[in-house]
Image (cartoon, grey):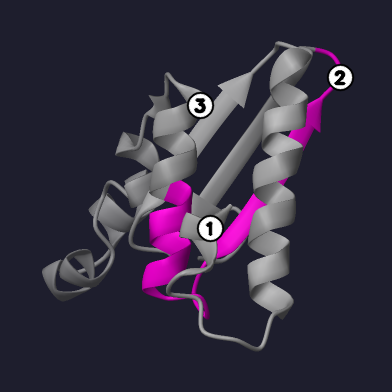
Amino acid sequence: MPPGFCFKQLYFATPLKYLIRYPLFTVYDIMPYYQTWEEFARAAEKLYLTDPMKVRVVLKYRHCDGNLCLKVTDDAVCLQYKTDQAQDVKKIEKLHGKLMRLMVSKESHSGAMETD
């Protein structure tokens, strides 16, 4: 989408054939944050192992709120976890390192996550 794009403009100013191509709600509007770390970590690993070439990992820290957000997405599924606890930083760092090791390894990814 171009910068400054608004779905309201799309809805009222374009023909119906374009509405089918660009729905009013995106995946990011309806994906909630995971409540437990273990559930999120399992889902993120599973998502990465399904298609490693499409998965992106975004780590964002907001100092004003004290929140650390981790998002793992492949444009079809978006997994999000948010925390303000300092003890969760080590868990996030461990998962992030595990995913980075998988991304640079040359061997098969099938059994790599189960061994850790």
Q: Secondary structure at mark 2?
A: loop
Question: Badge 3 is on which residue?
Answer: 37
The amino acid at mark 2 is His
Q: Amino acid at mark 3?
A: Trp
Span highlighted in magenta in the image: 44-64
**Do the residues under discs 1 and 2 have CB atoms within 8 angstroms?**
no
Q: Is residue 41 above or below residue 10?
A: above
Local crowd at mark 3 within 10 Å, few (<14), some, or many (≥20)?
A: some
Disc 3 versus disc 1: distance between alpha carbons?
19 Å
Decide if residue 56 is on the left or right side of residue 74: right
Q: Which residue is mark 2?
A: 63
Q: Are marks 2 and 3 in contact (CB under 8 Å)?
A: no
Compare marks 1 and 2 and give the one earlier in the sequence. 2
The answer, for residue 6, to whether it is visible in the render is no
49 falls in the magenta region: yes
Label 1 vs label 2, nearer the camera: 1
Q: CA distance from mark 1 to mark 2?
A: 35 Å
Callout 3 secondary element: helix
Left or right relative to 7: residue 63: right
Q: Residue at x 64, y 59 (%)?
A: 99
**Which residue is label 1 attached to?**
115
Q: Residue 112: x percent and y percent?
A: 53, 67
Measured from the top left, where is residue 92 in percent x and y?
68, 35
Write the residue at 42% across / 19% down. 35
| Residue 33 image position (x, y, % from top left) | 43, 27
- What SS does tag 1 mark? helix
